[in-house]
Image: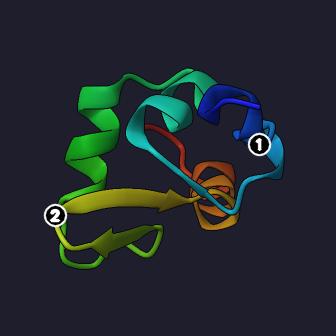
Amino acid sequence: MNKAEQQVLVPVWKKSNLTLEEAAAYTGIGVNKLRELSDTDFCEFVIWIGKKRLLKRKKLDEYLEKAFSI
C-alpha cells in the first residue's frame, strides 16, 4: 500500500474541526467571509494550531443557527 491508499478519508460532517475550505463547502459561506469572522478575538469557533486555523464544526453550527445575518 502506498501513502495515498493508507490515508483515511473522513466525511466533513463527521469531523470535529474543519479547514477554511472544508467549512466553506460545508456551510456555503465563502472562505474570505469565514476568515473574516474567525479573525476576531471573541470568535468561539476557531482554534489556532500555530498559524493554522481550524473551525470547530459544532460551535460554527451553533453560531450560524443564532445568526440573523453575517
Where residue 53 appears, as percent x and y from the top left, is 31, 58
* Label of residue 45 in the image: none
Residue sitting farthest toward the front: 1
Q: Is residue 19 left or right of residue 61?
A: left
Residue 70 visible (yes or no): no
Q: Nearer the viewer, mark 1 or mark 2?
A: 1
Taking 6 as reference, is 60 left or right? Answer: left
Q: Is residue 49 visible?
A: yes
Specify the quadrant of the image occupied by residue 28.
Answer: top right
Q: Which residue is mark 2?
A: 51
Q: Is residue 13 above or below residue 54?
A: above
Q: Give left or right: position of 25 versus 48.
A: right
- Tell me: 28 left or right of 65: left
- Vertical arrangement, residue 32 with respect to residue 61, above or below: above
Dot 1 lies on which element?
A: loop
Q: Secondary structure at mark 2?
A: loop
